[in-house]
Image (cartoon, rainbow, N blue to C red):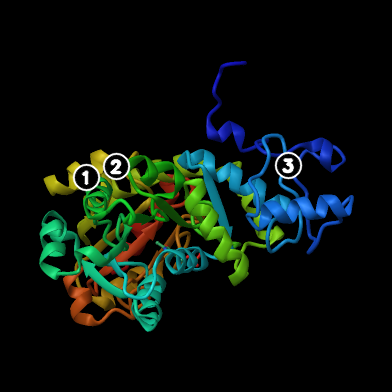
Amino acid sequence: MSDHKMHPESLMMSHGYKPALSEGAIKCPIFQTSTFVFQSAEDGKAFFEVAYGLREKGEKEEPGLIYSRLNNPDLQILEERLCLWDEAEECAVFESGMSAISTCLLEFLSPGDVLLFSNPLYGGTDHFIKQTLTRFGIEVMGFYPWEQDQLPELVKRSGKADRIRMIFVETPANPTNTLIGIKACAELARSLSTADRKVLVAVDNTYMGPLWQHPLKLGADLVLYSATKYIGGHSDVIAGACLGSKALIGRVKGLRTFLGCMAGPWTGWLLLRSLETLKARMDIQARNAEQVAAFLANHPKVERVYYLGQLNDPKQQAIYEEQCLSAGAMLSFTVHGGEAEAFRFLNALKLVKLAVSLGSTESLAEHPASMTHAGVDPEERAKLGIAENLVRLSVGVEHPSDLIADLGRALNAI
Ligand SMILES: *Cc1c(COP(=O)(O)O)cnc(C)c1O
């Protein structure tokens, strides 16, 4: 085994955890404690020197446990395991996806900076950017997927090129699975960077989870997750994560310490449990989604399917091949008719639950126009293809024939 490099799914059972430090317990216990006892005053002093960045941690030195707002074994082990999927140097976990996103934006943006972002963004992120960041003198500038080819030109014409500090991207976009090219954004960021001012690319990778798209390998600097979705995967915990280089995540962790939005030990423990089955769950979910999408594409009550495995635009297909490792398990479709027909379908579902959120073991369906995207103004919604007859599905791990039977019965109720 000496030079055999194990896959992340194999390492999820053991990586970063030493049973001998926990009475031999096979699973990492929940370290439900606010503070940690120092063996000596000298130890306490040494731990604080490292925590406050007064000196670098020594080669063989273990990071000392101080206080659960700074560090806790459940969080540290979770962060080390999350790094394996994205091949990141470092990770910071949070009590929600929104706290990961907002902490990251606040750390790297200052008054006078411009944030360039892709449309549409997750509702919470969109609100935070437009309502909160702008109150602190940060300018925001959105672009649409169909403008991505002309983005360098649009940036140049805006007259703000030298003030852009970060490009924030969410791909595939929710709910229509439109792709934004991560490599092209990274190239643009490089072209806008100067020796003393690096333009960062941050990607919200929640929709693809840590398996199906690796933004850091495509040139992004930061990758963000709502760990509530695939990583947690059981609809029983809210959490988030941010990954990147040691230097960048060191800064994110610094602000996290002072905002106090780290994940608690119980959240950390739940996610460690979830990570053991992440690969198995996501494999089954993607396989099920492929069968569901094929069924929907041929159903007479269905107008159009938005699924990464059935793209018909060559530009989108090229981005897909460049950056996605799977078509994923999120799909949307329009039924013939309007809101009434979509509602009749949703109300007739039995196995598939009517709820927002995604990436969990159980399949979920929702109506974007009146639910997740109700806050988007109607004109903007129409522009983005979020129609009244659009339904979004998150495909779970149930047996595919049961899912198809449930969807078929509900479609026939229209
Ligand atoms: C859910 C979600 C978020 C927010 O995460 P929370 O864990 O609910 O705070 C951010 N981005 C995307 C794409 C999401 O789906």
Q: Which residue is mark 1?
A: 319
Q: Secondary structure at mark 2?
A: helix
Residue 304 image label: none
Q: Position of residue 172 (x, y in %)?
A: 30, 55
Residue depicted at 10% across the width and 59% down the height: 153
**Compared to 320, does 395 lie above or below?**
below
Decide: is 368 above or below 147. below
Which mark is in front, 3 or 2?
Answer: 3
Which amino acid type is shown beneath numbered disc 3? Glu
| Frontmost residue, 297 versus 272 | 272
Q: Position of residue 401 (x, y in %)?
A: 41, 46
Instruction: State how far apart marks 3 and 2 are (Cα).
Output: 37 Å
Report the residue at 62% width, 52% height from top.
271
Q: Which residue is mark 2?
A: 323
The amino acid pointed to by label 1 is Ile
Q: Amino acid at mark 2?
A: Gln
Residue 62 - label: 3
Q: Quadrant of the N terminus?
A: top right
Location of the C terminus by quadrant is: bottom left
Q: Nearer the viewer, residue 398 or 52?
A: 52
Looking at the rendering, the quadrant in which ligand 1 lies is bottom left
State the residue at coordinates (37%, 68%): 122
| Residue contact between numbered discs 1 and 2, judged by CB atoms under 8 Å | yes
Q: Is residue 148 visible?
A: yes
Percent across and percent down for residue 400 are: 42, 45
